Amino acid sequence: MAKEVDMSTKYDPTSVEAGMYKKWLDEDVFKPNGNPEAKPYSIVLPPPNVTGKLHLGHAWNTTLQDMLIRQKRMQGYDTVWIPGMDHAGIATQAKVEAMLNEQGISRYDLGREKFVDKVWEWKDDFADTIHKQWAKLGLSLDYSRERFTLDDGLSKAVRKVFVDLYNQGLIYRGEYIINWDPKARTALSDIEVIHKDDQGAFYHVKYPFADDTKFNGKDYIEIATTRPETMMGDTAVAVNPSDERYKDLVGKKVVVPLVNRTIPIIADQYVDPEFGTGMVKITPAHDPNDFKVGNRHDLKRINTMNEDATMNENAGKYEGMDRFDARKAMVKDLKDQGLMIKIDPIVHSVGHSERTGVQVEARLSTQWFVKMKPLAQKAMENQKTKDSVNFIPERFEHTFMQWMENVHDWVISRQLWWGHRIPAWYNNQTGKIYVGENAPKDPENWTQDPDVLDTWFSSALWPFTTLGWPDTDSKDYQRYFPTNTLVTGYDLVFFWISRMIFQSLHFTGKRPFKNVLLHGLIRDEHGVKMSKSLGNGIDPMDVIDQYGADALRWCLSTGTTPGQDMKFSYSKVESAWNFVNKIWNASRYVIMNLGDMKQPKLPAQSEWNLADRWILSKLNHVVNHVTEEYDKFNFGEANRSLYDFIWNDFCDWYIEMSKEILTGSDEVAKENTRNILAYVLDQILRLLQPVMPFVTEKIWLSMPHVGKSLVVAYYPVNHDEFNDSQAESDMNHLIDVIKAVRNIRSEVNAPLSSPVDILVKTDDPELKKVLKDNSDYIDRFGHPNKLEIGADINIPKLAMTSVITDAEISIPLDELIDLNDEKTRLQKEVQKFEAEVQRAQKKLANKKFVENAPEAVVNEQKEKQQDNENKLKAVQIRLKDVEDALNK
């Protein structure tokens, strides 16, 4: 008799998940196991920005990490997963400024100190939100080790790194053309600039000669520019020294329109004589290439714009105008003065700020830079050693190496108030620079650099600073660094991964992580990238509210292939919920039938029946396969094999077969079946725990078990004694017979309630014995009026037949069958088996296949061919019998 269990008849994620995360935290199951003999395994969480709520991409990323750390924890590793958040300088400051702007307040109204206080308030609010989201996702993070990129320990490490690099000559301060965000009023690195196609124009302008020089009969040269607003900063016109057209013009002077300043014509290899007129204006303060030309020719640098991209005093009458308004005004004036030759509309690629979206300016500015060549060289050399970083998929190593080979010096200063203040001070009297981890001893005589460091400067140190560096004697640093696996998006190879690698190698002498697992972007079901502007974004917390965290996690991890984007849809989550519900109901059935069992104990192997031997052999295969696929980071493949085993083998077959025994009178057989049901379910829950932590814990706690939590239970391992290929073969035959009977019943619409005669014809004595020994199962699933199994069975003409390997299953249906329908069905079967035979023959006729394929693969093809030939022959005989019956 089934016992009462505290499990609802339908899976309800809300009640299952309620209080579970707090229970885990209270029991400290997410902390390292403290076993010095255990092998360490560490992951640092890619720190989310404190700019808002986590999105679906975060849910995907963190689910994969949680699966890894949960499995390793169960496998006995001394695991640690370190959480943390990133201050995200420009992004967070932009968010807070936007919030204040809605209140009519600017950061300048507040001043630096009060503004930073406001950002800390923002950070605390959103950190609390992120903590709740991590809990809702079930992430097994060790909060006792949580870090923030602006906390005291990390700030100390950042200062040390800056000072050391400066003292080593790898950080320098200089005036260069940099990418400038006029909205955030800060410098940007190259990879923080997104290029987009914009409507623009080539403005062809007359630059008159300063004297009576003529060129092609004209008293001017023609210069084409896309940015007339920078003309006020022109300091030369350049031609290629090999361009015969202009060799006599080199050294001549022309007048810059609108400003009437005289500039020289110079020769420089930079100019492409094939592009446009072969003459270009040189504006050293507003173009990176022009800046280099200017340095070679000692040209003056004239900056014509303010920080907010309005025109400055060097722009003359246009001072104070927005850059684009100034462009319109200049174009009008050039037309009015007869200096505009023509305007050609174009579409060209223009840089925009990744954070604020505004068009970036190339601006002359004094900034701090990291000299990248030596650091990049060390990172590239390390990839040739046994301690290289393993990229998954491997193709992204090429992306990494290519960027390192072509890397530019990294501008690390940002004109922001939120972030790590640059540890440099300028003497108020002498202007001398002091760089140090601590302020000068006489701070009243020094002024600290107002800039902060690029966010990526501190996050590049994340893998080792979170573990205690620069204190290299730190227990965590000694125990868990280098970390094992970093999981992140492939879009961060340049931004973050590369910087972590070269900083770690430089400061610790070690790679930051052994593996970096890269995933793609989350897209909607139509393959479109999710974004707020398109309205196709999905909040993972909404999905959890509707379907539960386990269903979302299963959906995200099953749909994943390393390095590929993922299409997300609610239908996939619904399918995942159905699977969780299937597990819930199967578990409920098992637990209801365990009686007073204290702990599952497998019966002696000699007492296992065919179904027992088969399910344990299949279980062993899935344990090995899932473990192997996790090691390869193929979570999707691991989940698919788990799904097939749980839904098909365990639920649809073994549980159904167990009912035959549990409703019988053999008490020993019942006890054996209960124990195997409990054991297999227990192993399934352990295999599922990394991906479905909530529902598996809830079920496991309802079972006879020893241990406080499934989170720290042992992960399933291989059992050679479970492998039983004969049991698998025998059970496959038995299942094929049952399926054949079901299919025949379905085709003639004969329900199980109507008993039919079932005839199984086979010449194989072993198969005959297997089917007879397990005829109870055929009785249960086929509901025969009479069951005959043997070689000499007379199959009546009016019967439906199905051919399986080594057997022919027939059901006489005198009153139900239509011979013409049966003839049509058998003709289709003949065509099917003929195609299979031809496919195998074609493959075996291929010399390359036979000579190069492994012997086992070739033999498998030969066996398939023989099997299908036997089936074809049996079907052809049945077809002839039916045709003879019709012709009578």
Image (cartoon, grey):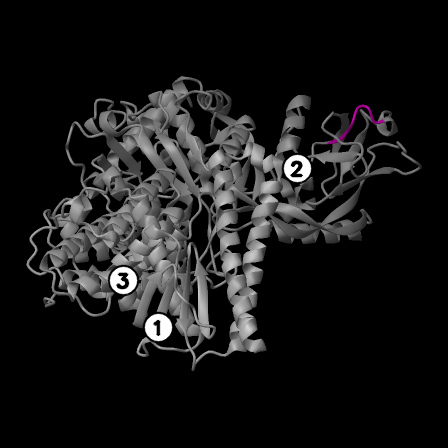
- For badge 1, the amino acid type reads Asp
Pointer 3 residue? 775
Q: CA distance from mark 1 to mark 2?
A: 98 Å
- Label 1 neighbour load within 10 Å: few <14, some 14-19, many 20+: some
Q: Give SS at disc 1.
A: strand
Rounded to the nearest angstrom, the CA distance separating label 1 from label 3 is 14 Å
Kindly identify which residue carries mark 1.
Answer: 757
Q: Nearer the viewer, residue 494 or 343?
A: 494
- Does residue 14 lie above or below 337 as drawn? below
Q: Which quarter of the image is occupied by the N terminus?
A: bottom left
Q: Is residue 420 visible?
A: no
Answer whether residue 610 is magenta in the image. no
Tags 1 and 3 touching, CB below 8 Å: no
Of residues 189 and 520, the one nearer the viewer is 520
Q: Which is more foreground, mark 1 or mark 2?
A: 1
Q: Is residue 721 above or below residue 867?
A: above
Q: Which residue is painted at 10% across and 54% down in the image? A: 704
